[in-house]
Image: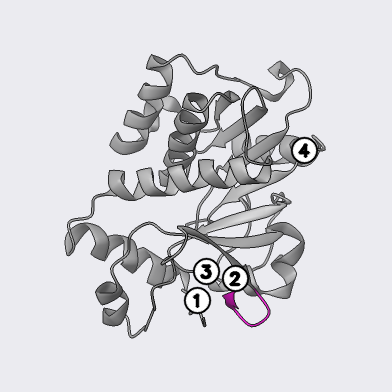
Amino acid sequence: MKIPTLTTSQMAEVDRLMIEEYSIELIQMMENAGRNLAEQARRMLGGSIIDRKIVVLCGGGNNGGGGMVSTRNLHNWGADVQAVLTGDESRLKDVPAHQWSILQMIGVPRVGNPVEYQGIPDLIIDAIIGYGLRGNPRGEPARWIEWANTQGAPILALDTPSGLDTMTGVPGAPVINAATTLTLALPKIGLTNPQAEPHVGRLYLADISVPPQLYQRLGLEVGPLFASDPIIAIDKTGLTTG
């Protein structure tokens, strides 16, 4: 099945229409994204995650909120999961702040800085920066990106590897080197750029419940991509389901 790509501005319009026109709220999209992210992590670890060591790097925006949802699910499924907040907790917006507070309530361990983490994780989840990136990552996000790339563990990126421009596919400095990227709704056009290949790794697409009627308003015809599975593999060369 052929799959269209989205520009960064089109993805922003999808998010706007979901909330303002179709009454599918941000917290619903975030729950869908985060649960699918947790499921992809489980698949990457062979189907069982009990006691597997996972570190989830959560930014301060909505991408980070999806990482927080995945953290909760992984914790509930028995993983030895730890969460990192790479932004300022006091500046979290309402929905990510809500997700972060849940993690504190259920006692998910928090890692405050890279030197605190002991051992080698089985998997690192990158939910630091989403499609709204402008320029190179700086400060704490940049420090955690560099840490992740040196751990020798596979990295699963949510929507896009942090530091990658989703419009052009040009990698920033630093940028996550993901083994797998789970993008949302439809692939972002920059993920298909050959420059992005070393950072994207294997590309998968996850359902966040975007109605086909919404895509039609953008001039896109999208078939029932997720009829058999909420997560599908993408062949980047022809942009078809894998």
Residue corresponding to mark 4: 153
Q: Are marks 1 and 3 in contact (CB under 8 Å)?
A: yes
Q: CA distance from mark 1 to mark 4?
A: 29 Å
Disc nearest the viewer among 4 and 2: 4
Mark 1 secondary-structure assignment:
loop
Residue corresponding to mark 1: 5
Q: CA distance from mark 4 to mark 3?
A: 25 Å
Above or below 139: residue 75: above
Estimate the x, y position of residue 113 in percent, counting from the top left. 65, 22
Estimate the x, y position of residue 217 in percent, counting from the top left. 26, 80
Amino acid type assigned to the residue bearing label 4 in the image: Ala
Q: Residue at position x 67%, y 67% from top? A: 170
Q: Residue at position x 47%, y 60% from top? A: 229
Q: Residue at position x 77%, y 61% from top? A: 198
Q: Magenta stretch containing residue 44, yes or no? A: no
Sooner in the amino-acid sequence: mark 4 or mark 3? 4
Mark 3 secondary-structure assignment:
loop
Q: Magenta stretch containing residue 237, yes or no? A: yes
The answer to whether residue 160 is seen in the rendering is no
Mark 1 crowdedness (10 Å alpha carbons): few <14, some 14-19, many ≥20? some
Amino acid type assigned to the residue bearing label 1 in the image: Thr
Sooner in the amino-acid sequence: mark 1 or mark 2? 1
Q: Which mark is residue 187?
A: 3
Which region of the structure is painted magenta?
A: 236-242
Amino acid type assigned to the residue bearing label 3 in the image: Pro
Q: CA distance from mark 1 to mark 3?
A: 5 Å
Q: Main secondary structure of the magenta part?
A: loop
